[in-house]
Image (cartoon, rainbow, N blue to C red):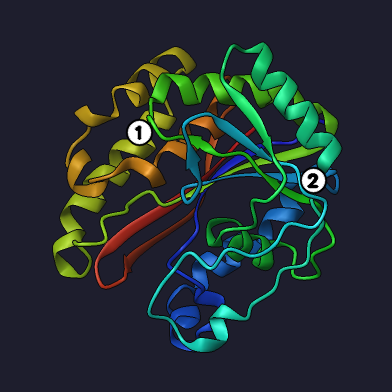
Amino acid sequence: MRQPTYFISHGGGPWPWIDDMRAALAPLEESLAALPSQLPEPPAAALMISGHWEAPEVRVMHGARPPMVYDYSNFPPHTYEITYPAPGAPELAEKAAQLIAEAGLPVALDDTQGYDHGTFVPAYVMYPQADVPVFQVSMLESYDPADHFRLGRALAPLRDAGVVIIGSGLSYHNLRLFGPDARVPSEAFDAWLGETLARPMAERTARLIDWESAPHARTCHAREDHLVPLFAALGAAEDAVATRVYTQEMVFGGVTASSWRFG
């Protein structure tokens, strides 16, 4: 059966392993833990497009047992010993690379890339037994919205092969502006995003490609690495209805953050 796609806000660093962060992000944990029950059947694999992996070409994780990437800093020592032993999905990775190449995008298989925290953190909450294969597809370092919609369209056939496609980022990501000063811009951008995703397909795609015209766009995404996964996730389900599956106010002292399902 055809799987939906998602754009999720994945929280901050290794938050499920830090008690106070986990308590603060309890609504996010609840939403991620509920995701498997929203699928029509257990997935063949989860394909993650993380805001923490970019390359000059699209790279597709090809390892059978991907290692860990602790791409965060200043967290407790135990968070650098986390393991998430989900298997990779080499055959599906090869199919993904073929589809991406057929779409005219530059692509390469990557046998060494490991799970970054944009992948292993939400995957751990969704599938704590690590019993669902997981593989990643990188962003293009250009961040070009139209190219990432193309990437999502290329990956769309995998949905019919039982793959759930998840864009993992944050609807607000400005590491220099958290706390109360983030409240107004994040609320405004989140409202714009929700309204945009509710529009008809062609209109919402056009608005997202022109996302910098949104209110407070560059305040909320000074560097758009955590927004770009949305373009790929929606491109893979471009005609689908968007459903908000998580929203939380006052995250990190002032941020409004949300996640959506498509289909």
Q: Residue at x 61, y 26 (%)?
A: 107
Single out the residue that lies furthest toward the left. Answer: 181
Q: Quadrant of residue 31?
A: bottom right
Amino acid bearing label 1: Glu
**CA gap, disc 1 and disc 2:** 31 Å
What residue sits right under mark 2 in the picture?
45
Nearest the viewer among 110 and 11 is 110
Q: Position of residue 10 (x, y in %)?
A: 50, 59
What residue sits right under mark 1 in the picture?
195
Q: Is residue 185 left or right of residue 137?
A: left
SS for tag 2?
A: strand
How many numbered discs, if any? 2
Q: Of marks 1 and 2, which one's residue comes earlier in the chain? A: 2
Nearest the viewer among 230 and 224 is 224
Q: Position of residue 179 (x, y in %)?
A: 20, 70
Amino acid bearing label 2: Ala
Above or below residue 228? Residue 175 is below
Q: Quadrant of residue 237?
A: top right
Above or below residue 14? Residue 106 is above
Q: Position of residue 248 (x, y in %)?
A: 40, 62
Q: Is residue 151 left or right of residue 196?
A: right
Nearest the viewer among 162 and 200 is 162
